[in-house]
Each structure stands twice: as structure tokens, then as C-alpha cells.
Image (spheres, coloured by chain):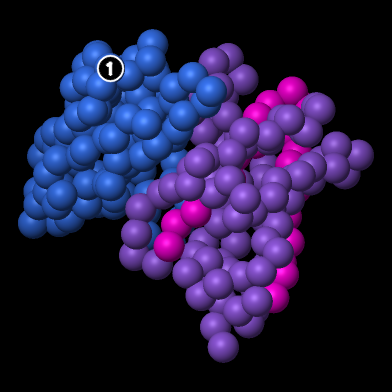
Chain colours: A blue, B purple
């Protein structure tokens, strides 16, 4: 099973700034099937990015994903109030094998 | 509009059984994998398993194999998650979610979650 490690654990930024979140896999992610989710407290997660870099339907273009193999990044430009939440990366592998990172909390500085 | 509507919160005693549900609308229920995910209080997301309602094929995470049972009734577009004997550690929010049709790689629609509390 692939282990996903997210960093940092907590990121403190101000509205309008840029956030850079990292997700590192213990081995290469199958077909770069790496997704990112945002979870606002009290709500279900929402898919932001799939396939490492494709934005899901309705996701603002301030969200972008990059990376391949074992190292992936979620970048959020011009942080909006609703972006202060917890972010998870998730991989999909054969069989299937699905796992999530432990999460990065983005808090207001 | 894609919707996954989950059943109401549950308060159960240890050792009791439980079934929670997830009713789908707005997409082909029999043509998509539906997943179940657990989030314990203050913790992250854990994948439990997926079910294909078209033929009820299931795939369980090794961490949850034998601990829960997934099923589906395609006539009423509803997926189920079942426990035979609950433990306090089963206290969590349980989400159902739909995998993307194109490559099954990500959960693109989620239910609102069902809070299950197990306490004596």
C-alpha cells in the first residue's frame, strides 16, 4: 500500500496570499492518479484536482495541481476565506488500492 | 444534479448491529462505483471499500475486510454499509462518495455524511 505524506502539517497564511501544499508518495503513483480535496469544517470533502493536475468541475482556476511519480503539489493562488480548511491528497492504484494523506490544515495567520 | 443523500445520525450501544444508507440521484447508479469512507473524530479520511451497484461487486480495504459489509439495491438506487457488532472505535462520520466514471481515480461527489456514535 502506498503511504502518502503531506507537508506541512499546518500552514498559516493571510487571505490573498499563495499556498503551496506538498504530498509525497512512498512509491510511484499509478498513472499519476493523485487527487486533492478540500474539507471545510463540518462539511464533506470536495474534489479539487484529479489526475495530478486536472481541475474538477466548478473548481476556481486559483487552484492548480502539479507533479508526477512520487512528488505532488497543490497551489492555491489568492487565498479566499473559504480556502482556510483541511486539504487531503489521495491516490488510486490497481485492485484498487486507495489511500489518503494525513491532511494539511491551512489556517488564517 | 448529482446527489448522494445519507441516512440520519445513529446512537448505538457496543455490540449492536447497524445499517446506514446512501440514496443516489442524478447519475447512472448502476454504472458508477460507490465508495464508503470513514472519518473518526478529529482525524483524517480512511477508505473502507467500494461497490459497483450494477452487479454488486465489492472491493474492500484490507483494513476493513470482515469488519463491515457493503451492499446495494439498484431498484431504489441505494447503497448500504452494515455492521454486525459495533465497537466504541466505530464512532465516526461515514461518507458515501461516487468515483469518477472516466477512470475511477477520484471521488467526485460526496454525501453529507452519517454520524455514528457507539457508546454505552
Residue sticking out furthest to the bottom: B120
Q: Where does the image place residue A102, in percent across and percent down from the top left?
A: 28, 47
Image: magenta residue range: B16-40
Instruction: Between residue B78 and residue A25, name the one nearer to us.
Output: A25
Q: Is residue B47 visible?
A: yes
Instruction: Between residue A69 and residue A38, name the one nearer to us.
Output: A69
Residue sitting at 27 percent across and 47 percent down? A103
Q: Where does the image place residue B27, in percent across and percent down from the top left?
A: 73, 29
- The residue indicated by pointer 1 is A28
Above or below — where is A8 with respect to B17?
A: above
Mark 1 — on which chain does it sit? A
Magenta segment includes A70: no
Above or below — where is A39 with respect to B49?
A: below
Q: Is residue B18 left or right of residue A46?
A: right
Above or below — where is B113 with respect to A5?
A: below
Q: Is residue B7 visible?
A: no
Amino acid at each position: 500500500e502506498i503511504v502518502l505524506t503531506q507537508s506541512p502539517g499546518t500552514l498559516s497564511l493571510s487571505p490573498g496570499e499563495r499556498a503551496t501544499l506538498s504530498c509525497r508518495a512512498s512509491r510511484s503513483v499509478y498513472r499519476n492518479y493523485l487527487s486533492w480535496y478540500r474539507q471545510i469544517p463540518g462539511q464533506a470533502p470536495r474534489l479539487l484536482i484529479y489526475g495530478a493536475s486536472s481541475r474538477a468541475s466548478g473548481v476556481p482556476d486559483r487552484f492548480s495541481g502539479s507533479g508526477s511519480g512520487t512528488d505532488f503539489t497543490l497551489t492555491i493562488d489568492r487565498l479566499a476565506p473559504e480556502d482556510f480548511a483541511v486539504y487531503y491528497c489521495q491516490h488510486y492504484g490497481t485492485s484498487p488500492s486507495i489511500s489518503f494523506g494525513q491532511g494539511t490544515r491551512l489556517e488564517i495567520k | 444534479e448529482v446527489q448522494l443523500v445519507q441516512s440520519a445520525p445513529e446512537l448505538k450501544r457496543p455490540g449492536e448491529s447497524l445499517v446506514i444508507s446512501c440514496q443516489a440521484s442524478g447519475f447512472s447508479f448502476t454504472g458508477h462505483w460507490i465508495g464508503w469512507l470513514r472519518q473518526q473524530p478529529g482525524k483524517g479520511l480512511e477508505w473502507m471499500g467500494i461497490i459497483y451497484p450494477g452487479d454488486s461487486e465489492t472491493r474492500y480495504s484490507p483494513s476493513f475486510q470482515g469488519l463491515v459489509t457493503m451492499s446495494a439495491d439498484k431498484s431504489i438506487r441505494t447503497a448500504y454499509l452494515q455492521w454486525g457488532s459495533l465497537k466504541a472505535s466505530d464512532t465516526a462520520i461515514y461518507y458515501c462518495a461516487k468515483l469518477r466514471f472516466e477512470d475511477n481515480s477520484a471521488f467526485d461527489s460526496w454525501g453529507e455524511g452519517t454520524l455514528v456514535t457507539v457508546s454505552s
